[in-house]
Image (cartoon, rainbow, N blue to C red):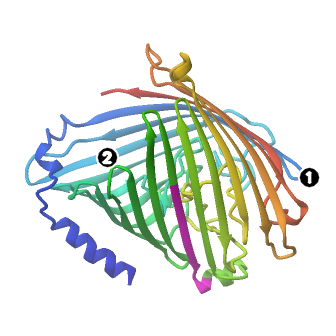
Amino acid sequence: MLNKRISLIALGMLSATQVMANDQAESKGFVEDSSLKVLLRNAYINRDKKDGNDDQREWGQAAIGTYTSGFTQGTVGVGVDAFGLYGLRLDRGSHSGGQGIDFFKEGDSGNPAGDLAKAGGAVKFRLSSTVLTYGDQMPVLPVLSYDNGRLLPESYTGTLITSKEIKGLELNAGRFTAESRKSAEGRDSGGLKSINVLGGSYQFTEQFKAALYASDVEDVLKKQYVNANYVFPIDKDQSLTLDFNGYRTKLDDSYVRESGATGDDNKIWSLAATFATGAHSFTLAHQRSTGDSNLGYAYGGYQKDQGRVGDGGNTIYLANSYWSDFNAEDERSWQLGYGLDFSTFGVPGLSYNFAYVRGDNITTSTSEGGTEREIFNQFKYVVQSGPAKDLSVKLRSSILRVSQKSSEYNSSGNEVRVFVDYPINIF
């Protein structure tokens, strides 16, 4: 049914001739609007696990090249996108590799690869303000969002249609049939059968925006997502933002049997209120997971090797997602957050974020009433000018403590992440 809906909506979007928007009419040409960028990334993650669990550590250097062409002129514009990725493992210690960090996939010997390289490309067509892209892509949608939080990014192979014919309205429809794991070579190293996505977002007013999306991962699950975001202006440099996000997930019967899940249904939502005043922001958020699935909110990972979902490692648009996602069965969590922009104090480009999140009421197959808590800190600095302009350094730490009743769901530990990203615009 979802396939038929996607086909009908895609056809409608491609045939749209709204006079409110026509990006193709502004095309300067295939070469004239093209760009080539290289991102140099040095990434390090160290997880000091507690309660007898093995420590994890990964360190690597990456080069991520992306080429984006413009569109040829005319009624229907044609263009291409391409990327090339290379990662070199710098840490050859005994703690390298492992699920969760996943810089380099472990091979049959149990050791991660020393390096990896891969490339991808896509062809794209634009009619008015509607673009159809076929090939290797890095989608950013609430129900299919690729993971770029490790050394190298994930990518997906398939078709995606994005329409912006009406001002403030974005519609998306797509079908992807392969997932490239961020830690392994090969176009289908993730083992995805197929995923269909459909939805859109609309900016109703300057203050209010909403979104609605759905996805269907073949033989795994069906998922719906809803978002509402409202900004209340208070003063010149003060505002209150309310952000609601929610997912409903229904596992397929076959996946329930194969995964050993105890149920097939999960609903999870979060509501965050952020008060911003000058350089400061204060956040209060609540998140709640309900349903009969012991998997809680299922997302991301790889169907091959991990037996996971395969819909993107960032497909969790929820407030209380840091090291822990606070997404266990029946879990309720609260967050107190704080942010500081140092530009007000004469240090532009420097920012700091803090969060304390506590979750309770966690249910596992052996216990009820489990808890977990996390203290999150992050400093980020972006160079503002000079030869190293736009180079960013991000230092992040988390202290996660999980009760014995919750040990089946999560494990305690201390985590440190250091990312240095240097984007270079070739042209």
- Asked whether disc 1 touches disc 2, contact meaning CB atoms under 8 Å apart, the reply is no
Q: Quadrant of residue 250?
A: bottom right
| Image coordinates for residue 217, horizontal then vertical, percent | 50, 73
Q: Indicate whether 253 appears above or below 58.
A: below
Q: Indicate whether 6 appears above or below 23.
A: below
Horizontal placement of 351 versus 294: left or right?
Answer: left
Q: Main secondary structure of the magenta part?
A: strand
Horizontal placement of 74 versus 329: left or right?
Answer: left
At label 1, which amino acid type do we have? Answer: Gly
Q: CA distance from mark 1 to mark 2?
A: 46 Å
Q: Earlier in the sequence, mark 1 or mark 2?
A: 1
Q: Which residue is mark 2?
A: 81
Magenta region: 243-254
At label 2, which amino acid type do we have? Answer: Asp
Q: Which one is nearer the viewer's eye here, 152 or 355?
A: 355
Q: Which one is nearer the viewer's eye here, 422 or 96?
A: 422
> Any mark on residue 52, and which?
1
* Label 1 element class: loop
Q: Residues within 10 Å of mark 1 (few under 14, many from 20)?
A: few
Q: Is residue 270 magenta?
A: no
